[in-house]
Structures are given as C-alpha cells and as structure tokens.
Amino acid sequence: MLSRVAENLYWMARQIERAENTARLVNVNGHLHLDLPAKARTGWDPLIVITSSENLFRQLYGNPTDKNVVAFLVSDPRNPGSIVSSLAAARENARTMRDIIPREAWEQISGLHAQAGRNVQKGLLRPSRDEFLRSIIVGAQTIVGMLSGTMSHDVGFDFLVMGRNLERADMTSRIVDVRSADLLPDLGGGLRPFETIQWMSVLKSLSAYQMYRQHVDQSVRRVHVLDFLLRDVDFPRAISHSLGEIEACLTHLPNNKDSLNVIKRLRKLVSDADVETLEQESLHAFIDRLQVAMGDLHARIAQTYFRTNLPV
C-alpha cells in the first residue's frame, strides 16, 4: 500500500474519532453542571486542558466561559481540534481516497461534515446544543460501523483501526488525568457525595458508565474507575483494549519491530500500574509517561509507514 494512502486512512480515522470525542466531552460537561451544586462545579476550562489547547485558547478568547469554550471546541476553524475542523480534515482525507473506501462511507463522511456546517449554530446555543452534539456522536459512530461492515479488513483497514484506537487511548488518558485532578479538590466533607457524580461523568465522557456497571461488581469509586478505564481488555475505550487492537494490526504489517516494542512497553506500563496507590501526583506522573509513550508509538508508525511524521 502507498504510504500516502496509509497515512490518509490513519488520519481520517483519528479525525473522525476526535470529532466524536470532543462532542461527547462538551455534552457530558454541560450535563454535569446541571447535576452539581454551584460551589462544586469545576467550570469549562478543564475541557481546554484535556484537549491540550490552553495556549491557542488564551490567544483567541482569554476568559474560559462556557460560551467561549463551546465555541472554541465546536465551531472555531482556527482550532484544528474543533468538531468542524476535525470533520473538514476527515472529509478532505476521505475525498483523496474515494477509490479506496466504500462509496457509502464517503457519502456518510461528506454528509456529516455538511450537516455539522449547516447546524453549527445549534451547537452554540444551550437549548439545542444537546441535539447537535448527539447528532455528531451518532454520525461518527455510523461511519465507524459502516467502514467496519463494508470495507475489506485488509492492510488499509489496519491503518484505520490503528488511528482510531490510538486517538481513543490518548483521549481516555487525558480525561483520566484532568478529570481526576479536578474532582472536588478542596471542598468540605459535606460535598463528598458529589464526588460519585463526577466519577460517573468521567465514565460517561467515554460512554463507559453502563459497561462499568455491568462488568465491575463495585460502586462508582476512583480506584475501580481507574482500573476499568486503564486495564479492561473488553471495553472498546479502555486503554488496554485500544493497545491490543493496535498491536493486532501491527502484526499484519512489515517492519513492525520498533512499533511492537513500544506497544509492549505501553502495555507493561499499564498492567504494572498499582491503581490503589496512584494518588493525584503519582497518577499525573503515570499519565505523563503514558502520553510520552503514545507519542513515541505515533512517531514510530509515521516514520515507518508514512511520508511524513505529522504531529499528533
């Protein structure tokens, strides 16, 4: 397969996943503000931290009000990680591969991009925001299902799966890092019951709440949520599952030794983590190591199989 095609498939998958993840983050944060009392609310700036956009956001907006953060993450074309920017980039990558991906998938990607553009104002207004964000999530999931069900599971599909799962693992690690640091850090004992609501929001940010309740025989608590999101091998957005999917794809590819070595290092880092002793400072250091290793994995894949080593 041409390196150009492999690269475009990989990035198309990442960009679609990024649009879905961003929509889910904004949606869940809005609902969280309705569930918590005013003095327990954590604001909208954690979403900027999760997406590593602090510098760009400050340059463009300054004050992290809900209106500014939502505009930056949903509709701002100057933000390459916004929903509209991610879908535009995914559509452009898909356009260059119309002879590679199924026609139905191309039409769905193009249609979702057009739909987002037509309805983007709904995403900026509180009464219609939920409807808009849900349409992005469902549209992105439809694309993933369509590609899985209509595209040959060959080498090209492997690059799609690797891109999607690396983006998922990256987002899961960011949510765990920032949201766990943000969970009622300095509030009195009277507000501790609301900590459960915030850990539920962590799970809901990843559409993980229902599967957690089905497969974890424990109430929603920090240590159990961390263990589930880091090490569960069956839940699609858990880091261990995503790494397993990437590893399986790499075994089909030539010149995979360096990338597989990074995967093994990542999987060992996750499996060896003692979630019961990962308090906030040590958890942040752990996530930092995880992020560095995932960046290394992206770089190894890009250096081996793509024309250029594009940044994450």
Image (cartoon, helix red, strand yellow):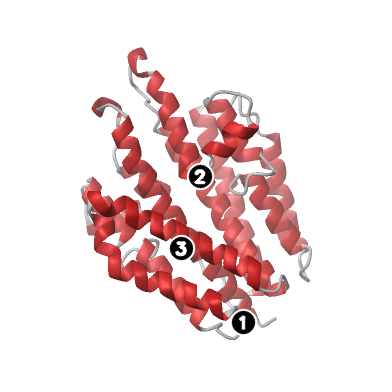
Q: Secondary structure at mark 1?
A: loop
What is the distance, in whole Å, between disc 3 and disc 1 at their CAs? 20 Å
User: Around disc 1, counting alpha carbons within 10 Å, would you say few (fewer than 14), some (14 to 19), or many (20 or more)?
Assistant: some
State which quarter of the image contains the N terminus: bottom right
Residue position marked by numbered label 3 in the rendering: 139
Which percent across, then down, holds residue 45?
Answer: 31, 44
Q: Residue at x 30, y 36 (%)?
A: 33
Q: Alpha-carbon neighbours of circle 2 within 10 Å: few (<14), some, or many (≥20)?
A: some
Amino acid on which the number 3 mark rests in the picture: Gly
Which corner quadrant of the image does residue 301 belong to? Answer: bottom right
Q: Is residue 265 visible?
A: yes
Q: For residue 270, what is the image quadrant?
A: top right
Disc number for residue 306? none
Q: Secondary structure at mark 3?
A: helix
Q: Nearer the viewer, residue 230 or 3?
A: 230
Q: Residue at x 29, y 65 (%)?
A: 119
**Mark 3 vs 1, N-terminal side:** 1
Left or right, 310 with respect to 100, comes to: left
- Residue bearing the label numbered 1: 100
User: Is label 2 in a helix, a strand or a loop?
Assistant: loop
Residue 64 showing in the rendered view: no
Q: Residue at x 61, y 39 (%)?
A: 230
Left/right of residue 266 with respect to residue 284 in the rendered view = right
Tell whether label 3 touches label 2 (CB within 8 Å): no
**Residues at circles 3 and 1 in contact by the CB criterion of under 8 Å:** no
Residue sitting at 58 percent across and 60 percent down?
A: 164
Q: Are marks 1 and 2 in contact (CB under 8 Å)?
A: no
